[in-house]
Amino acid sequence: MKYNDFIHMSVAGDGSCFFHSLAAILQLEGDPIPLNQTMKTTEINRKKLSKDLRKQCFTWLTNNLDYRIKGLGLTIKDEIEEDNRDNDKINTVLEYLKYMKTPDAYAGQIEIYAMSNILKRNIRVYIHNKGKFSNVGLGYQINNQRDIMKDIFLYHNLGKTKSKGLHHFEPLYPKAKAKKEVKEIQKNKSSRNTRRRSTSRRSTRRRSTRRRSTRRRSTRRRSTSRRSSGRRSSGRRSSGRRSSGRSRRRISNKGRGDIPLQKYCRSCTYTFDDGDERYMWDQMPFCKRCAEIIIPELFKKYEKAKENKCVVCKGIIKKEDMFDVTSYNHKGKLLLAHKPCLSEMLD
């Protein structure tokens, strides 16, 4: 597996990184998110989902201590007792389960067994080595079929640190899966637009039919008013009211035709429909994909940069300017530059 085939995301290293990673992947796969929800609210909902996954894991382990692990022949209880031999603070299975219920308890292979059975999906864990992903024995397969669209992929920093307390899980999202989801969104959007155009055509026909019938009624009234002088004056007043009503309708129709605000994603220029989800950051709209993937990557580069200044004009670069900034490595250092400044320098 190549590293460039995945989108490598980051999660908090607070002891629940395994459950945070699962929650991030489940959110990307289509958990319902309200319209115009901010990134801060999305992060809060992700943490709630992470806590719920930990509770489900604790319940499954408690009720399935006799579950035999595929390929090993050992039970969950045997695995916990084996793990307790290297732990001076935990001695019994009950103590292990109580410890795993706490929010900062580090999850490992035993919890991977549980979540794989709960989600009914293969969980594959990889380490990064020389631009490629390799498996070191972590993970669990319910079935032997490799499905990049259904399997869950996680990164682990095994070998990068010697301390067990610094071990860390992070989510990996296949780029092929992300591209397929974008195509489905665009397809659904085009079908919605087609339905709206057909609906607008029908409504236009109905309005034109109503206008013709209104004209016929007004013509009959005018012809009737000419027969008597008393009705002629009242007919003029009513015609004046009708003309003012038509002018008001023109104004309201013109108002409906105005281009709505915040129509495009600030990052990928994705065109929003009325029912699409928008994520606001600094009064700028973003689509779900950019809000979950692109924005955190930009801020990650911002924090890793040697100086938050443009190398060309020496101007200070803020976080909200990162969408118009190019980053590149120079002698092992990450440098930032405004795109217009860099283009002028190259010209």
Image (spheres, grey):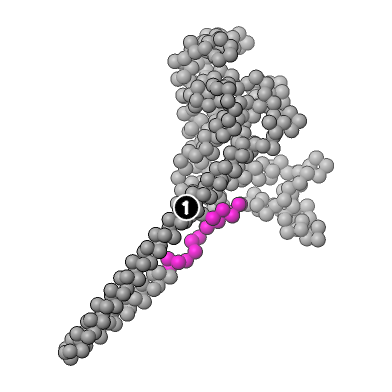
Picture quadrant of residue 1 = top right
What's the residue at 48%, 24% (across, down)? 118
User: Is 328 covered by the magenta stretch?
Assistant: no
| Outermost right residue | 331
Q: Residue 41: give x, y in percent of width and height.
A: 50, 42
| Number of numbered markers | 1
On screen, 315 above or below 231? above
Q: Residues within 10 Å of mark 1 (few under 14, many from 20)?
A: few
Asked whether residue 289 is in view, the answer is yes
Asked whether residue 105 is in view, the answer is no
Picture quadrant of residue 79 = top right
Horizontal arrangement in the rendering, residue 240 relative to residue 29 (left or right):
left
| Outermost bottom residue | 229
Horizontal arrangement in the rendering, residue 252 relative to residue 132 (left or right):
left
What's the residue at 81%, 44% (across, down)? 330
What's the residue at 33%, 66% (across, down)? 206
User: Is 262 covered by the magenta stretch?
Assistant: yes
Q: Residue 222: give x, y in percent of width and height.
A: 24, 84
Horizontal arrangement in the rendering, residue 332 relative to residue 138 (left or right):
right
* Element at label 1: helix
**Between residues 267 and 304, which one lies in front from this camera angle?**
267
Q: Mark 1 points at which residue?
A: 191
What's the residue at 50%, 25% (across, down)? 120
Picture quadrant of residue 173 = top right
Q: Residue 229: give x, y in percent of width and height.
A: 18, 91
Quadrant in which the C terminus is drawn:
bottom right
Q: Which amino acid does label 1 sit on?
A: Ser
Range of residues picked out in magenta: 255-271
Q: Main secondary structure of the magenta part?
A: loop
Q: Residue 249: give x, y in percent of width and height.
A: 36, 72
